[in-house]
Amino acid sequence: MHPQFAALENEVLSATSGMEEAAFSIHPEGKWCTAEILEHLTLAFSGTVRGCMRCIDAGHPLATKPSLKQRAIIFWVLDCGIYPEGIAAPKTVVPKGTVHGKASLDGLIQVIRDMDAGMQACEEKYGSKSELMDHPVLGPLAVHHWRKFHLIHTQHHMKQVRALRAPGNH
């Protein structure tokens, strides 16, 4: 497994370690519970897996040309590591609440491994620095940027999971 995806998997396992089944459903009003956060990440990672497969099937990367604004956002998020707060998730990755409890964790771990395999296949075919496909907000990203984005995005959400587990949120 690529080191960034190993770190991503470890981040998830660390944040959810020892959680009881009921703890996956706890959330403040209007916020996602742990199971929904994990479902959100599963949906996002699954979209990346599908994108990798589309690139492989097409025989070439599918990225568009980045705009100046997209380059600035990519620099801000991926080079500076600043994940913006309060941006609504694209509708395709909003959790539907169909996966509950520890099953949400099991599904996420599997899709992390699928994503790692898809990224590895694309990297072997196109290299790590050629823009592969478009992210719905950031725009075109290369394999190395996809890995970094998913790690930063996961770290952002695992802070939320840890906050849900803090005393007073039970």
Image (tube, rainbow, N blue to C red):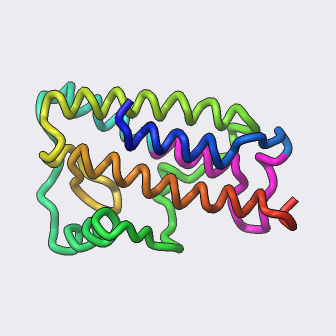
Q: Is residue 170 above or below residue 121?
A: below
Instruction: Tell me if residue 41 is in the magenta stretch.
Output: yes
- The span shown in magenta is 23-44
Q: Position of residue 156 (x, y in %)?
A: 53, 61
- Say which of 75 and 62 sits in front: 75
Dominant secondary structure (helix, strand or loop) of the stretch shown in magenta: helix
Q: Relative to 140, is 93 on the left or the right?
A: right
113, above or below 24, in the image? above
Residue 70 in the image: above or below residue 164: below
* Image quarter in which the N terminus is found: top left
Which percent across, then down, holds residue 161? 67, 56
User: In the drawing, does residue 28 fall left or right of residue 67?
Assistant: right
Residue lying at 55% horizontally and 32% vertically, measured from the top left = 109
Q: How many marks?
A: 0
The residue sitting at 65% across, 36% down in the picture is 105
Q: Position of residue 129 (x, y in %)?
A: 15, 47
| Residue at the spot 30% in from the left edge and 38% down from the top edge | 51
Residue 166 position by quadrant: bottom right
Say which quadrant the C terminus sits in.
bottom right
131 in relation to 105, above or below: below
Query: Residue 18: within the magenta?
Result: no
Tell me: 156 left or right of 98: left
Residue ID at (51%, 73%):
85
* Image coords of residue 74 (percent x, y): 27, 65
